[in-house]
Amino acid sequence: MAVAIGGVAVAVAAFLAIGSGSAPSGPKTLTSDQANLLAVTRFRNYQAGGRAVTIDVPNTAGGLTVTGSIDYRGKIGYGVVRGTGRDTSSDGLIQWTATAVFVHPMANTPAKAPARPPESGWYRRPLQNYGSSLDSSLAIALKLGSDRPENAELLPQNGAAWVGQDRLDGHQVDIMTGPSARTRSGTPGAVRYWIGSDGTMYRVRVGVASASRPVVIDFDTQKYVPVRPVPGATPAR
């Protein structure tokens, strides 16, 4: 697919099941202004350098919430992961890149990750491309930044659409879907974006094949803290 934001859809196609959103009134063909907003939304994250995020990951065992920051230039995320139900065994600190996940288990997980990660106690594993709703969510969140705007003219041609409007944490937003993608099972789906009037991304919702409910990624949920790589983590530059 020639459209970079479509590349997000292609990249998550292995994870994607179906997205959903609130206050829908579409879908409708994007106007030129709406296409321009969608075209710059990932670039806005890159321009900002990084964003504070909360990632809610549904799971049959209870679910996980990652609260932290993503450096969209360095392509690395860091924060606290907490579980509910039977998923509390995953509690602790977490850092991730496009290829690896670093976990630091903690019995008493803090509400916020320390600005300077601990120098020891980390366990590294490869980021799984399939079968893990957590890893799928981390990979998707990391891909929501781009060093250049998309081609706004190609977005509507590849299935991007306007869904409706909403208010989110005091912001008036347009809800749009990105270019269509297909899951491994052939089910059509698209990433759904909540975008402000200047193209700022405030929420993303996307289904993953390993979860029964969509993953929700919210931005600016707390103050952004620059990400410091843990020993052994190699961010992209």
Image (cartoon, grey):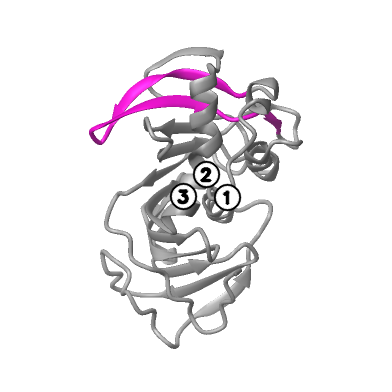
Residue under label 2, please give it: 42
Look at the numbered discs 1 and 3 and tell me whether their residues touch, using CB distance below 8 Å: yes
Q: How far apart are marks 2 and 1 (CA)?
A: 5 Å
Residue 45 circle label: 3
Q: Is the magenta stretch mostly helix, strand or loop?
A: strand
* Residue 97 appears anywhere in the view: yes
- Name the residue that disc number 1 marks: 146
* 180 in magenta: yes
Q: Residue at x 57, y 65 (%)?
A: 97
The amino acid sitting under disc 2 is Arg
Q: Measured from the top left, where is residue 70 in percent x and y?
A: 45, 59
Element under label 1?
Answer: loop
**In the displayed image of the protein, which residue is found farthest to the left?**
170
CB within 8 Å, label 2 to label 1: yes
Q: Nearer the viewer, residue 109 or 40?
A: 40
View extreme (bottom): residue: 120
Mark 1, other Cα within 10 Å: few <14 / some 14–19 / many ≥20 = many
Image check: 118 left or right of 31? left
**Magenta residues, as a range?**
160-182
Q: Earlier in the sequence, mark 1 or mark 3?
A: 3
Against 212, residue 29 (above or below) is above
Above or below, comparing residue 218 to residue 116 in the picture: above
In the figure, 77 relative to 43: above or below? below
* Frontmost residue, 172 versus 188: 172
**Where in the figure is residue 5, as x and y percent of width and height?**
62, 38
Q: Is mark 2 on a helix, strand or loop?
A: helix
Q: Mark 2, residues whose alpha carbon is within 10 Å: few (<14), some, or many (≥20)?
A: many
Q: Quadrant of the N terminus?
A: top right
Q: What residue type is labelled 3?
A: Asn
SS at mark 3 in the image = helix
